[in-house]
Amino acid sequence: MEYIKKFVLRGLFGITFGVFINQLVYLIMALQGSIVQISSDIIISQFFLASLTGFYCTGISVIFEIEEWSLLRQTITHSIAMLPFFPISIYAGWIPGNLIGRVIFILNYILVYLIIWFSFKKYWEKKAKELNEGLKKRNNI
């Protein structure tokens, strides 16, 4: 129950974050002159898709707080839980429609997870080493 509550609370923050990023993309496109005109239907659907994506993606970060699981299990579970992002992204037009664009997106997706996993692994190894050295010093005094 604790994880569900955290999921919902983070998800509510994620709505704001998702919509902010969506609007930031629109702003960047507008500043580049890429947007000529956007219909209200597109703005409304993008708002809801960004809200849904922000809620879900931010909410599932609670997976990384399940202390009984290894970092590898947390990362794999999180990457699998993120799979609904693909059809939503395709529907929303956030992923290129052609095969090459989708393959590049998937490769970037995998690369990001590898970077996250190795970064956290190194971080926690460093923290464990610092804690062990602190315990050794404390026991020697």
Image: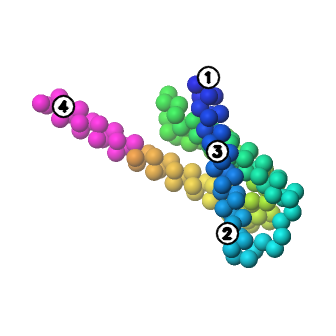
Mark 2 highlights which residue? 28
Mark 1 highlights which residue? 1
Mark 3 highlights which residue? 14
Of badges 1 and 4, nearer the viewer stands: 1
Residue type at the position of mark 4: Arg
C-alpha gap between disc 1 and disc 2: 40 Å
Of the numbered discs 1 and 2, the one sitting upstream in the chain is 1
- Give the vertical position of 115 relative to 57 (above or below): below
C-alpha gap between disc 4 and disc 2: 54 Å
Q: Quadrant of residue 9?
A: top right
Image coordinates of residue 122 in percent, x first then y, are 40, 48
Q: Magenta stretch mostly in which secondary structure?
A: helix
Mark 4 highlights which residue? 138
C-alpha gap between disc 3 and disc 2: 21 Å
Residue type at the position of mark 1: Met
Q: Which residues are magenta?
A: 124-141
The C terminus, quarter of image: top left
Of the numbered discs 1 and 4, the one sitting upstream in the chain is 1
**Residues at discs 1 and 2 in contact (Cβ within 8 Å):** no
